[in-house]
Amino acid sequence: MEVEIVERVIAKKQVGESCVICEQIRPAGIHLYTSFICTDCEQTMIQTETSDPKYKYYVDKLRKVNKPEIYS
């Protein structure tokens, strides 16, 4: 069981993770709760003005990010 978890973590670091914005596998980025945002999308979002049509696209994509529930 523990070996499988370690193997999955190692595989993620070697291959990358799926970005919640561009939906491509990327090697580097940030985690927002349980979602991954690649470095390229992060930089593009930061530089997007609220009047830009792409802003709504990013807001819609970020709606996929849910705060994880806390289980006791």
Image (spheres, rainbow, N blue to C red):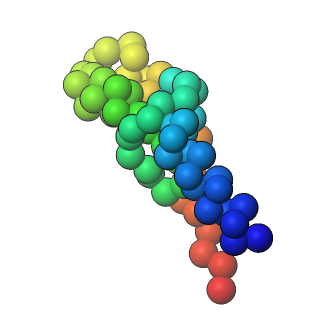
**Position of 28 relative to 44 (above/below):** below
Q: Residue at x 34, y 33 (%)?
A: 39
Residue 29 visible in the snapshot: yes
Across and down, in percent, residue 67 comes to 54, 59
Across and down, in percent, residue 1 comes to 76, 70
Residue that extends furthest to the right in the rendered view of this protein: 1
Q: Is residue 10 left or right of residue 45?
A: right
**Position of 62 relative to 40 (above/below):** below
Q: Residue at x 54, y 36 (%)?
A: 15
**Position of 67 relative to 29 (above/below):** below
Q: Is residue 50 left or right of residue 1?
A: left
Residue 60 visible in the snapshot: no
Between residue 43 and residue 2, name the one nearer to us.
2
Residue that extends furthest to the top in the rendered view of this protein: 53
Between residue 70 and residue 1, name the one nearer to us.
1
Indicate the quadrant where residue 72 lies: bottom right
Across and down, in percent, residue 44 comes to 30, 24
Indicate the quadrant where residue 41 lies: top left
Residue that extends furthest to the bottom in the rendered view of this protein: 72
Q: Residue at x 64, y 56 (%)?
A: 7
**Position of 61 relative to 57 (above/below):** below
Q: Residue at x 59, y 46 (%)?
A: 11
Image mark count: 0
Between residue 35 and residue 8, name the one nearer to us.
8
